[in-house]
């Protein structure tokens, strides 16, 4: 029987997925954001078959590490190991996001490091965001999920050539914002490279300063609240206290 706490977690996940739609991360019905179950039962994530903007609390399921659906109705996504294996490897991670961000996918194909041409790239330039090259196909097994977790390491995420991106965070707000920022940083560098070879970006000293100043938790929450409001204005789930 669903509890009030379960309903609250499902609602939080619905809002996070809606925020990804507002951030321009949609790819039809593919991609997903998850939230660690505080009782240790697995991860809450949207059911398969729905786009980010279509997710409601009723379209969220609780998935155990073995892939069983513990709560909610609907099918779980094939790539649930992305979420469960990263969370198993990283006790500090409360949320995982996987999208097929167009710019991130294109940039992942290049053998060049991501530079912080703007604030967007600050969390991904020092050290450079890694690329997961074990496979560009579906991450549908625990083994591949663990390999992905190894690529992410203790960082904020990774690029997956031929596939997309993964970001993590202590909460949905951080993981969602990082997905948006990583894709935007990739888009900026692609535009700069199309115009010529970029020659100016934040050096390591400035990056360390920016990492302390630009994206503290209050700024992450401010950006996330904007995405939530934008999603709600388009008819998504509402979470005024997100």
Image: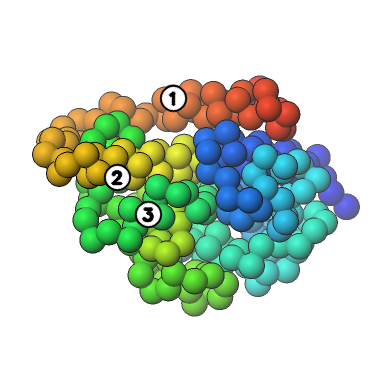
Q: Left or right: 207 with respect to 134? A: left
**Do the CB atoms of the residues marked 2 and 3 lie less than 8 Å apart?**
yes
Question: Picture coordinates of residue 60 (x, y %)?
Answer: 73, 50
Which disc is residue 218 wearing? 1
- Label 2, secondary structure: give it: helix
Question: Picture coordinates of residue 145 (x, y %)?
Answer: 49, 69
Question: Picture coordinates of residue 13 (x, y %)?
Answer: 66, 43
Question: Picture coordinates of residue 143 (x, y %)?
Answer: 49, 77
Report the Cα–Cα distance between label 2 and label 1.
Answer: 29 Å
> Label 1: how many residues lie within 10 Å, few (<14), some (14-19) or many (20+)?
few
- Mark 2 or mark 1: which comes first in sequence? 2
Report the Cα–Cα distance between label 3 and label 1.
Answer: 31 Å
> Label 3: how many residues lie within 10 Å, few (<14), some (14-19) or many (20+)?
many
Residue drawn at x 53%, y 43% as measured from the top left: 25
Residue hosting label 2: 190
Residue hosting label 3: 106
Residue drawn at x 73%, y 68% as measured from the top left: 68
Residue drawn at x 44%, y 24% as measured from the top left: 218
Report the Cα–Cα distance between label 2 and label 3.
Answer: 8 Å
Q: Left or right: 134 with respect to 27? A: left
Q: Is residue 4 above or below residue 35?
A: above
Q: Quadrant of residue 19?
A: top right
Residue drawn at x 23%, y 61% as measured from the top left: 111
Can residue 208 be seen in this snapshot? no
Q: Is residue 230 above or below residue 170?
A: above
Which disc is residue 91 wearing? none
- Mark 3 or mark 1: which comes first in sequence? 3
**Do the CB atoms of the residues marked 2 and 1 lie less than 8 Å apart?**
no
């Amino acid at each position: 029987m669903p509890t009030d706490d379960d309903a609250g977690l499902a609602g939080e996940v619905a809002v996070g997925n809606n925020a990804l739609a507002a951030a321009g991360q949609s790819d039809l019905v593919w991609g997903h954001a998850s939230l660690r179950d505080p009782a240790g039962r697995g991860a809450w994530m949207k059911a398969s078959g729905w786009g980010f903007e279509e997710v409601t609390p009723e379209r969220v399921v609780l998935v155990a590490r073995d892939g069983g659906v513990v709560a909610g109705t609907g099918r779980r996504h094939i790539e649930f190991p992305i979420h469960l294996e990263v969370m198993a490897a990283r006790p500090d991670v409360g949320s995982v996001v996987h999208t097929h961000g167009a710019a991130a996918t294109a940039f992942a194909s290049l053998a060049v490091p991501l530079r912080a041409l703007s604030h967007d790239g600050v969390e991904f330039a020092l050290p450079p965001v890694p690329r997961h090259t074990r496979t560009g196909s579906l991450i549908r097994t625990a083994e591949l999920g663990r390999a992905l977790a190894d690529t992410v390491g203790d960082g904020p995420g990774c690029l997956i050539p031929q596939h997309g991106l993964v970001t993590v965070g202590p909460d949905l707000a951080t993981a969602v914002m990082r997905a948006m920022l990583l894709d935007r940083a990739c888009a900026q560098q692609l535009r700069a490279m199309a115009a010529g070879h970029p020659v100016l970006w934040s050096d390591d000293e400035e990056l360390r300063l920016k990492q302390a100043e630009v994206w503290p938790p209050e700024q992450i929450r401010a950006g996330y609240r904007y995405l939530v409001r934008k999603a709600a204005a388009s008819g998504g789930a509402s979470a005024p206290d997100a």
